[in-house]
Amino acid sequence: MSEKLERSENKAKVSMYTTRFCPYCIRAKMLLNQKGVSIDEKAVDFKPALRQEMIEKSQKTSVPQIWIGATHIGGCDELFMLERQGKLDKMLNQNSES
């Protein structure tokens, strides 16, 4: 089994609404990939129904919109704020069923 797969098995589920060329989406994905997290990515490019789903769930129109488990954390700025505060790893390492 690969190291990345082993590392991602112990991480909380991460879902992210993105667009293909959004620099903030790319930065958020890079940080999560560095931490060995598998991302359930939902690209909203040219998908108005999926974008509307994102807006209804998050009450936000910008991308990325990120969930760790059932917790909506917001966008890229909020993700990096959690990292700077030392809270991101704890959230990612929580069992997704708790």
Image (cartoon, helix red, strand yellow):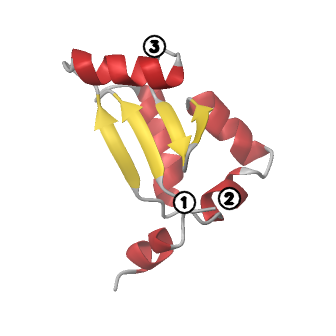
Q: State left or right for residue 38 relative to residue 93.
A: left
Relative to 30, 35 lies left or right: right
Name the residue that disc number 3 marks: 61
Is residue 32 shown left or right of residue 78?
A: left
SS class, disc 1: loop
Whether 9 is drawn above or below 28: the answer is below
Marks 2 and 3, the one that precedes in the sequence = 3
Query: How many numbered marks have been drawn onto this rendered protein structure?
Result: 3
* Residue that lies at the very extreme toward the front in this rendered image: 98
Q: Residue at x 56, y 45 (%)?
A: 70
Q: Amino acid at mark 2?
A: Asp
Q: Are marks 1 and 3 in contact (CB under 8 Å)?
A: no
Do residues under tags 2 and 3 come within 8 Å of each other at their CB atoms? Answer: no
Q: Secondary structure at mark 2?
A: helix
Residue 97 place in picture, x, y as percent: 56, 62
Q: Which mark is residue 42?
A: none
Name the amino acid type tagged 1.
Answer: Ala
| Residue that lies at the very extreme toward the left in this rendered image | 46
Name the amino acid type tagged 3: Thr
Where residue 9 sits: x, y (%)? 46, 73
Secondary structure category for the residue under label 3: loop
Query: Who is closer to the viewer here, 18 or 15?
Result: 15
Identify the disc placed on residue 12.
1
Quadrant of the drawing holding the C terminus: bottom right
Q: Looking at the rendered structure, which numbered label has been put on residue 89?
A: 2
Left or right of 37 on screen, residue 83: right
Q: Residue at x 31, y 26 (%)?
A: 21
Q: Is residue 57 above or below residue 70?
A: above
Q: Residues within 10 Å of mark 1 (few under 14, many from 20)?
A: many
Please tell me which residue is depicted at 41% across the width and 58% down the height of the picture: 38
